[in-house]
Amino acid sequence: MSPDLPGAPARTGRTDRPRREVVSFVRRGTRLSHSRQAAWDRSRERWVLDLPRGERDTLPDVDGPLDPRAVFGRTADLVVEVGSGLGENIAAAAAAHPERDHLAFEVYLPGLAQTLERLEREGAGGNVRLLPFDALHALGTLLPPASVHEMWVFFPDPWHKAKHRKRRLVAPPFLDVVAPLLAPGGVLRTATDWAHYALTMREALDADPRFENLHPDGSGPTGTATDPIPEELPLQGWAPRFDGRVVTSFERKAGDAGRLVWELAHRRTERTSTS
Ligand SMILES: C[S@@+](CC[C@H](N)C(=O)[O-])C[C@H]1O[C@@H](n2cnc3c(N)ncnc32)[C@H](O)[C@@H]1O
């Protein structure tokens, strides 16, 4: 823990028991290979915002949001990726856009360590930080209102069994967290390779007046999918492939398995509530 991290709020000192909320991830292994451990040891302090944690180690125990200006030492557009996996996108984005700042939320320790290896390899600078926290339950605490220029959620865990669908991240509770964090005109970009999850996303976003679909007439992906396409899945309203997104190992596996990519882009409207 780094209590003196620039921009970090104070610890609350509260010891409430963690609430038993539904989470959108599974805790997979935390063991690190030799090279990932070495990258973690070398570069964690540089790029990981390792804030004090509460009783649940995926939740920060802080009293108020980070100050992005202090974290990055400047004011710049902020891009936030939720579920950055092995870090392909956040590392590529930070390298391609030195004028922007980038935050990545990820709970999978080996993924974070691999992201550090990637940042080292690319000679990344000070415009990227990793947050080892559950974004759904920590974003609203850690980021100030209207501070995010773009929020990205690419290939979130699919939770394709019916009994697990309540764990899908891109759903109304997540939109309640994201909407106030987006700056006016800020954009939420989402993509999934599971047609049924694409329907979950559309149902949530189409019903939410705080978000405006940037591609109301856009057609969906073409080709034959190996997963079932729900009849209710709209034919239009899909975004073209976002050219700021690199092909990650998850997307490659989806393509190998014959699934299509359903992509969306929504802008925050001026509305502040869903009614
Ligand atoms: C299927 S992977 C996709 C990774 C990456 N976005 C990509 O396109 O390759 C989904 C990732 O989201 C992470 N994740 C799921 N729920 C999360 C949450 N609430 N907060 C932070 N990370 C989360 C998982 O740990 C996992 O690494």
Image (cartoon, rainbow, N blue to C red):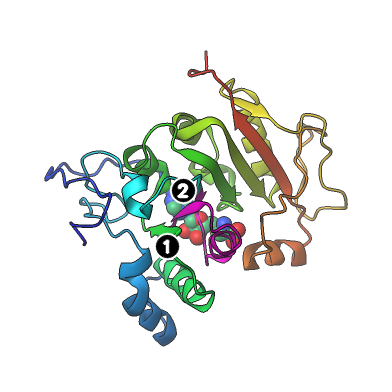
Question: Where in the figure is residue 197, as x and y percent of width and height?
Answer: 64, 43
Q: Is residue 202 above or below residue 251?
A: above
Name the foreground residue: 162 vs 201. 201
Q: Residues within 10 Å of mark 2 (few under 14, many from 20)?
A: many
Instruction: State whether residue 180 is above or below residue 10.
Output: above
Q: In the current view of this chain or complex, which residue is farthest to the top?
A: 275
Note whether ligand 1 is within 8 Å of mark 1.
no
Query: Residue 208's x, y, as percent?
Result: 58, 23
The image quadrant of residue 233 is top right
**Residue flagged by tag 1: what amino acid is it?**
Gly
Element on which disc 1 rests: loop
Q: Name the residue under label 2.
A: 24
Whether residue 25 appears in this view of the structure is: no
Please give the range of residues in magenta.
Answer: 80-108
Q: What element carries label 2?
A: loop
Classify 10 Å Cα crowding around label 1: few (below 14), some (14-19), many (20 and above): some
- Residue on which the image places disc 1: 126
